[in-house]
Amino acid sequence: MPHSMRDSGFMPANYLDPASPFTAQLGTNYVPGDGEILDIRRLVQPDSIWARELVRMDEQIQEMEISLGQLRERRDALKGNIDAHKALVSPMRLAPDDILREIFIACLPSATNALMDPREAPLLFGRICRHWRDIALSTPMLWASIHVPLTPRAGMDISVTTGVLQRWLKLSDGCPLAISLYSHDVYDSSLYDPHHIVSMVLDVSSRLRRLSLRGPFDIFLPLLSLGPDSLPCLRRLELSDSSHPDTQLFKDHPEAMNIIQLPSLTGISMLSAGMDCDLLSLRWSQLTSLTLFQQNYTSPEEPASGHLDCNKALEILRRCPNLRRCSLTITELDLNHCALSSNSVHISLPFLESLTLAGDFLLSSWIPKLSLPELSYLCIGDMRNDGFRYGTITSPNIVVRINSGFLTSSALFDILNSFPLTHFELTCDNYFDDAELSDTRIIMDDAFLERLCPPHNMCPLLTHLIVSNPSSNFSGSAAMDFVRARMGMDIRLQCFEVHYYGEAVDTNIPDIQSFVAYGLRLEFKNLSRNKSWGFNPGLGAYDAVARYLQF
């Protein structure tokens, strides 16, 4: 290389001394001889041309990095100055306090009561700036709900929890309250006594609007025993008992009936293993929201006493004409005769928007003489996937979610013909293996899809279809014909999702892809491909290694 190029401080990245005899051997598995090793070492020794040029490059890089670092510092300082000036005229700085209060309230969690978490509203607003903290502390509505975990597993000392709750309730300043208390199944009162927290809630009972109690009910008996004078505003109540299934709350503690008989109560949710439906004495006609879920720790053949069977479920529906949301867990012993399907008395629920029926039963037909003019969400059976959730679909859409293990094919077609549904989800869990009923099971085949297409035109308003059924055996061609037929109707298909086992379905067809480009969501998820390799080569190996290393 010419001397002038080295003096300029520049050398090409692929520079090699032309005098090197090893250019052809570089990057190969060539093994040099003893004399060649000495020659190679002379080429790379510290005073060689390559070594000196490497030092020069390192020095230049260091100088450039120092210059770049200084430039970045100047740039960061300038940007910080610009951002600080922009902050002076930011919309949030100029927003009136009343607007900020409304924004703060809108940031409160909607699925739960507010948490004792500094990373979430409302505590988060106290960590932004002094002005926001002052606004938050002077807005009682921000502190009108709270969730209190009464267990050491939450990671907070009881004294800290007590102090936070006391301050929280004071900041609520007379607002109606929504409080949820959660206690672990078993607690050691010598380490963590929740009764002091319960007594603090008792002190503000006159302001309670919503109350949720989850845990052993003996902890909450002082609250459950309160009457209308102490709970004049309570409208929503959730009871979730984690006591032993042999515990009968209302039988063992009749005074606990006080809270479920309040004249102000319009919504109640009860989840309990020991709930005796025969003992429930609610003001049924005033309820707008009802959830009854009885955990069955035995079996459908030997349910817990006071279980909710189909006849009792029908009687409850008759007694609750003002319901808007209802969820019932039913245990029916005689699968060959489901009282729901043989109802003979007219039941009118003119306001009911959401109905969920789960548990252990088998519908042979849709419930006769049941009038549901405002229904927008129907769920039958236990649904274990996300699917369509009530509250996520806007009116006038009607959502139907069905687990095929809970009804026969005739019952399914009754439902599909009874409601102008727009969203339909069908999943499969065959809980009952009755050979006599096998011929009536729902079969997802080509004939089923054909009934959803012209000229049959069943479900003409259907826009979304989800099928999660391992026993689905319709062909790929029938599925594509279904898509074409529905896309040619006045109301087009928007979503077709299938979870199945079997051969892959080819959707890479020009006209089908044109529908996808138009906006159709099309997904065929082959569940068999997602199954992990069953063999675990490391099972037990790590324990064996650990034992070996100890000796």
Image (cartoon, grey):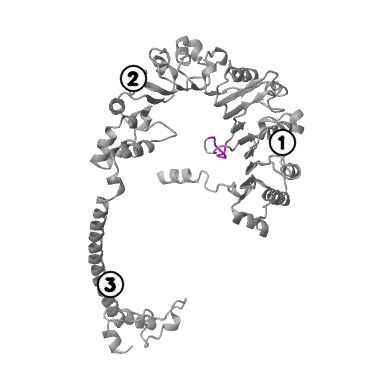
Instruction: Assess whether mark 1 and mark 2 are in contact (beta carbons under 8 angstroms).
Output: no
Q: Name the residue under label 3.
A: 61
Q: Does the magenta stretch include residue 412?
A: no
Categorize mark 3 by other alpha carbons within 10 Å: few (<14), some (14-19), many (20+).
Answer: few
In the image, the segment drawn in magenta is 384-390
Q: In this view, does 382 lie to the left or right of 89?
A: right
Residue 503: which numbered mark, if any? none
**Foreground residue, 121 or 278?**
121
Q: SS of the residue at dot 3? A: helix
**Disc 3 and disc 1: Cα gap in Å?**
73 Å
**Foreground residue, 190 or 203?**
203
Marks 3, 1: nearer the viewer: 1
Q: Name the residue under label 1.
A: 442
Mark 2: amino acid: Val
Q: Quadrant of residue 440?
A: top right
Q: Which of marks 2 and 1 is nearer the N terminus?
A: 2
- The answer, for residue 403, to whether it is visible in the render is yes
Please tell me whether residue 388 is drawn above or below residue 301 in the rendered image.
Answer: below
